[in-house]
């Protein structure tokens, strides 16, 4: 078990270093918007930032936690088996990082993007087989398997987007539809379902019935595919399809409310198994998810849908709410809850600064979005967003320094 714990901590630390790189790229982009910086190509940095955030940070962390889950069920060190897959994902992530910075969408970046997808296929195949071999079956396995399927489905969008960009096809509708397709099945599929599977594995230990959690799973899995069109309501879709989309949004929101009610009911049992620090982080992630699902439901109203997809700051704010507020905070909270990381005063300070940066970033993007809608110019808004990016970068820097220190002093 000591060897297993050491492997988990090693791979988690690597993932946090990658998060630091993601934050640095965010600072570069915000600096480029606010100040003169001709030596970097904004589009290249954007592609590097987004691809590395998905593969180098979130996917790397989630893969590590899934392998750790296998070990927790059998007391075996599965990292010996998965080292090549984790290493391959890491190498393709850095390949995308460097190639997108160098050439944007080109032959090298497309090769690394394709290799990254093939690694995800291999991981899905191996993990699925190992999941089936576990002696005790759990509802968490349903979440995990759905996550793997949605990750594979999302790759269709990646291949289509690469084809469109490589051939310089000037078709904005297809371009946006393809991007939203990929993003949807990544953050609403692969990321979200993996996190929910990990969460459910802990909720079961506190006494919540698997039958109830399976009902929540069915509500989300049935809604996942049709809810893609929540990101494409600007397309001309039939009335029946629109009603299905509305139903999907309602189904997800209802499922989350039911789960929250159950969690509140079992809060004493749940809180007894989670340290206060991890508890606060997971509560913030839950608040972010609640806001996300409410906004998602609100976007089914045609007027609000036009606002949501007609203004870039609103779209960016929504994506950061999901990827930072929901997914990233869950990963950090789950890692702390399971003692995958050592925390200390330096780490605590970094976390507070990082979360403050996330909140400021969301507030400033909301202000920018509202100002765009009303044709109002808010002074220094880009500089404020640059400041929020620096705040997040400094926070992640301190988090990484705290992890390097490797001792718990609080």
Image (tube, grey):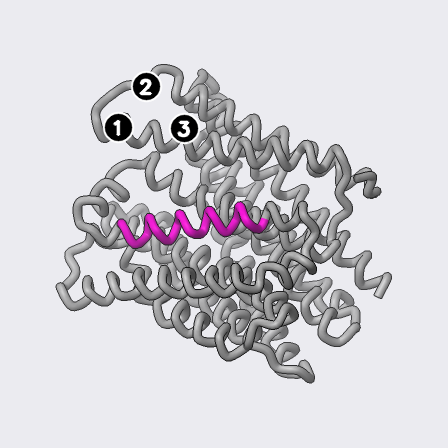
Please provide the residue range marked out in magenta.
Answer: 282-298
Mark sitting on residue 73: none
Q: Residues within 10 Å of mark 3 (few under 14, many from 20)?
A: some
From the viewer's perspective, is 131 left or right of 230? right
**N-terminal of the two: label 3 or label 2?**
3
**Snapshot quadrant of residue 87:** bottom right
Question: Where 291 falls versus 138 (above or below)?
Answer: above
From the viewer's perspective, is 65 left or right of 193? right
Q: Quadrant of the N terminus?
A: bottom right
The prevailing secondary structure element of the residues shown in magenta is: helix
Q: Residue at label 2? A: 378
**N-terminal of the two: label 2 or label 1?**
1
Q: Residue at label 1? A: 372
Give the image location of residue 222, x and y in percent: 36, 72
Give the image location of residue 354, x and y in percent: 59, 34
Q: Secondary structure at mark 2?
A: loop
Q: Residue at label 3? A: 364
**N-terminal of the two: label 1 or label 3?**
3
Q: CA distance from mark 1 to mark 3?
A: 12 Å
């Amino acid at each position: 078990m000591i060897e297993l714990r050491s492997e988990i901590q090693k791979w988690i630390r690597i993932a946090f270093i990658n998060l630091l790189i993601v934050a640095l790229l965010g600072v570069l982009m915000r600096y480029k918007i606010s100040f003169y910086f001709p030596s970097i190509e904004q589009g290249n940095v954007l592609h590097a930032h987004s691809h590395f955030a998905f593969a180098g940070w979130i996917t790397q962390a989630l893969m590590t936690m899934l392998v750790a889950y296998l070990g927790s069920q059998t007391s075996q060190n599965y990292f010996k088996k998965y080292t090549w897959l984790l290493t391959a994902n890491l190498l393709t992530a850095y390949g995308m990082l460097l190639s997108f910075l160098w050439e944007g969408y080109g032959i090298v970046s497309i090769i690394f993007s394709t290799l990254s997808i093939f690694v995800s296929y291999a991981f899905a195949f191996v993990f699925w087989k190992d999941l089936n071999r576990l002696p005790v079956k759990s509802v968490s396995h349903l979440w995990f398997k759905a996550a793997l399927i949605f990750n594979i489905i999302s790759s269709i969008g990646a291949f289509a987007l690469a084809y469109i960009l490589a051939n310089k096809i000037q078709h904005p509708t297809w371009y946006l539809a393809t991007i939203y397709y990929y993003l949807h099945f990544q953050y609403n599929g692969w990321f979200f379902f993996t996190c929910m599977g990990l969460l459910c594995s802990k909720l079961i230990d506190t006494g919540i019935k698997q039958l109830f959690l399976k009902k929540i799973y069915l509500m989300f899995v049935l809604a996942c595919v049709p809810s893609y069109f929540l990101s494409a309501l600007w397309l001309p879709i039939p009335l029946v399809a629109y009603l299905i989309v509305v139903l999907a949004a309602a189904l997800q929101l209802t499922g989350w409310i039911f789960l929250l009610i159950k969690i509140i009911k079992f809060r004493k049992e749940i809180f007894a198994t989670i340290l206060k620090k991890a508890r606060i982080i997971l509560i913030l992630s839950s608040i972010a998810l609640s806001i996300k699902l409410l906004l998602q439901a609100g976007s089914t109203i045609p007027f609000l849908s036009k606002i949501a997809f007609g203004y870039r700051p609103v779209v960016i704010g929504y994506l950061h709410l999901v990827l930072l507020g929901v997914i990233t905070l869950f990963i950090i909270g789950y890692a702390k809850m399971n003692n995958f990381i050592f925390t200390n005063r330096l780490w605590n300070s970094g976390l507070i600064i990082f979360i403050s940066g996330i909140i400021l970033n969301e507030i400033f993007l909301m202000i920018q979005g509202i100002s765009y809608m009303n044709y109002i110019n808010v002074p220094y808004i880009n500089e404020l967003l640059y400041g929020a990016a620096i705040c997040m970068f400094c926070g992640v820097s301190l988090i990484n320094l705290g992890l390097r220190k490797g001792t718990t002093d609080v």
